[in-house]
Amino acid sequence: MFTASACTSIVSNVTENLANNLAIAIMNQDDPELVRNGAPAYLLLLDSLIEGDPENPVILSAAANLYALYGSIFVDDEERSKGLTKKALAYSSKSLCLSQELTCYWEDYTYQGYLDVLSDIDERHAELLLNHAVASLAYTRAHSADWNAIARLPHIQALLERYILISRDNTPLDSVYTYLGIMVTLRPPALGGDYVKGKQYFELAIKLSEGKNLNAKVEYAAGYAKPLYDRDLHDRLLNEIVAADPVTSGYTLTNMLAQEKAKSLLESADDYF
């Protein structure tokens, strides 16, 4: 005989699986326009799941991930992007807060205090931590004119470095190293920017994915080769992306988008270099 709590647990598990499977299905989609046009409905669906289970960190984290993806990649309007990535960050922050209470007060801590709390997060909350880092990075890129947001990049870097330490042995880390590469090439040296380290991160991401992660290559070209005026590297990476088969489990959507960006960068290369 089912108890009320057992029924609630079953419903919660089904809802969590739906949220996670939705994210997987989107990442394996080979038609970016379908995602661009359909994602608002998915976002509303996740919002409705949160309305029904507002204290579920897994659903909040999955929603944060999709809001970050949509707000940072598919939205051209700057103000909308800011709003969507702000919501992604709010969802991911609440997800962590529900799972690790001390993270609720991160904004009040010194950087060292922040690191101390971060060091207590273990592998049980690894995915929540990663999604919080992704949402934080999406928010920062959308608010790149705000120096307060840029000043938080070392905090995001620390999130990703902690994730690397606590992630399971079979966890793909190429996307994490891509994010690290983006961060150290996005900010100036005075705030920890480092092109040498960025190059290392991008190359490690490409190696770990065995070249399947085309987004790592396009970010390497745009974030490292282009600002350093290394046209040979820039064009080589972009031509490799254009020539590659983008359909690969777990990478298809981002690979399709990387190919679109690579073509655009190649078309504008003569004007830049």
Image: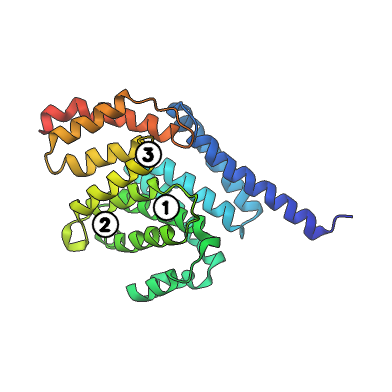
| 176 with respect to 60 (left or right) | left
Percent across and percent down for residue 34 are: 48, 27
Percent across and percent down for residue 5 are: 78, 60
Q: Quadrant of the N terminus?
A: bottom right
Identify the secondary structure beneath mark 2: loop
Q: Which one is earlier in the sequence, the residue at label 3 or at label 1?
A: 3
Residue at horizontal 14 percent and vertical 33 percent from the top? 232
Tell me the residue that label 3 is attached to: 73
Q: Can residue 143 be seen in this view?
A: no
* Residue type, mark 2 in image: Asp
Identify the secondary structure beneath mark 1: helix
Cα gap from disc 2 to disc 1, whole angstroms = 16 Å
Which quadrant would residue 153 be assigned to in this image?
Answer: bottom left
- The 10 Å Cα crowd at callout 3, few under 14, some 14 to 19, many 20 or more, is some
Tell me the residue that label 1 is attached to: 135
- Label pair 2/1, CB-CB below 8 angstroms: no
Residue at horizontal 18 percent and vertical 35 percent from the top? 233
| 102 with respect to 45 (left or right) | left
- Label pair 2/3, CB-CB below 8 angstroms: no
Q: Closest to the observer: 119 or 79?
A: 119
* Residue type, mark 3 in image: Ile
- The 10 Å Cα crowd at callout 2, few under 14, some 14 to 19, many 20 or more, is few
* Residue type, mark 1 in image: Ala
**Residue 230 image label:** none
- The 10 Å Cα crowd at callout 1, few under 14, some 14 to 19, many 20 or more, is many
Tell me the residue that label 2 is attached to: 146
Residue at horizontal 28 percent and vertical 36 percent from the top? 218
